[in-house]
């Protein structure tokens, strides 16, 4: 059940719990260092004119009781999402999640292309611009959504984590 490419999946939630589920999953991603496996958690919103006051615009959930996740499907990510409080299951037959098709993603206005980092965790990189120019470090974390990496650099004899843009580093 493991994916080689990330896909968009849909998790069904209790109605009204979408944002809570999103926050809980994001917290679990951070706690378990799953940023490179669960890339994005989304509750799509729609701007709608209020019925009694056409000048007032309010945000409304596009898909009430659903949370969209861009992730690599594997046992760990399935377990994390499925066991989040408020999630009743994935959309798909039985307990097998089915990824959204490209057509479904395009009709919702979701981004289909994730920025690819030309390096992976554990690689040595050199900073090519900015304050840390010509500094080498080891990639410890990759944030595909914000196009940044966290590298450990040696400062005053200690390893210090620094977040740097994809554009400012290159593989050694």
Image (cartoon, grey):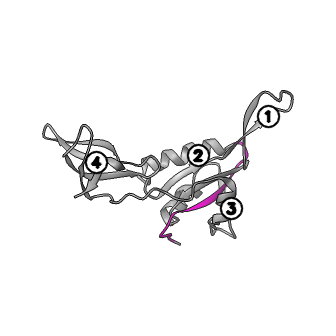
Q: Quadrant of the C terminus?
A: bottom left
Q: Could you tell me if the residues under marks 4 and 1 are in contact, i.e. CB atoms within 8 Å?
A: no
Q: Which residue is mark 3?
A: 104
Please tell me whether mark 3 sits on a helix, a strand or a loop.
Answer: helix
Q: Which residue is mark 2?
A: 22
Distance between mark 3 and mark 2 Cα atoms:
21 Å
Name the side, left or right, on which 1 lies relative to 108.
left
Closer mark to the observer between disc 3 and disc 2: 3
Closer mark to the observer between disc 1 and disc 2: 1
Q: Magenta stretch?
A: 2-16
User: Percent from the top left, x then y, of residue 154?
Assistant: 17, 43
Q: Nearer the viewer, residue 169 or 122?
A: 169
Q: Is residue 90 visible in the rendered structure shown here?
A: no
Q: Which residue is mark 4?
A: 151
> Residue 78's quadrant in the figure?
bottom right
Q: Residue at point 67% right, 64% down?
A: 103
Q: Nearer the viewer, residue 113 or 89?
A: 113
Task: Looking at the image, tell me whether mark 4 or mark 3 is earlier in sequence order.
Answer: 3
Name the side, left or right, on which 10 lies relative to 142.
right
Q: Residue at point 28% right, 42% down?
A: 161
User: Percent from the top left, x then y, of residue 7?
Assistant: 56, 63
Distance between mark 4 and mark 3 Cα atoms:
36 Å
User: Percent from the top left, x then y, of residue 45?
Assistant: 68, 43
Distance between mark 1 and mark 3 Cα atoms:
25 Å
Closer mark to the observer between disc 4 and disc 3: 3
Distance between mark 4 and mark 1 Cα atoms:
45 Å
Please tell me whether mark 1 sits on a helix, a strand or a loop.
Answer: strand
Distance between mark 2 and mark 4 Cα atoms:
27 Å
Asked if the stretch drawn in magenta spans residue 126, the answer is no
């Amino acid at each position: 059940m493991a994916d080689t490419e990330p896909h968009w999946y849909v998790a069904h939630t209790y109605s009204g719990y979408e944002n809570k589920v999103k926050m809980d999953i994001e917290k679990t991603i951070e706690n378990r260092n799953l940023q490179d496996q669960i890339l994005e958690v989304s509750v799509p919103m729609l701007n709608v004119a209020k019925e009694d006051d056409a000048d007032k615009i309010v945000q409304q959930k596009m898909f009430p009781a659903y949370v969209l996740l861009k992730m690599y499907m594997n046992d760990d990510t399935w377990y994390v999402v499925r066991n989040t409080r408020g999630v009743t299951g994935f959309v798909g037959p039985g307990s097998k999640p089915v990824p959204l098709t490209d057509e479904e993603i395009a009709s919702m206005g979701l981004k289909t292309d994730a920025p690819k980092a030309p390096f992976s965790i554990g690689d040595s990189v050199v900073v090519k611009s900015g304050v840390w120019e010509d500094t080498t470090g080891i990639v410890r974390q990759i944030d595909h959504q914000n196009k940044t990496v966290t590298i450990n650099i040696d400062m005053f004899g200690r390893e210090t984590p620094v977040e740097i843009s994809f554009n400012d580093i290159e593989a050694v």
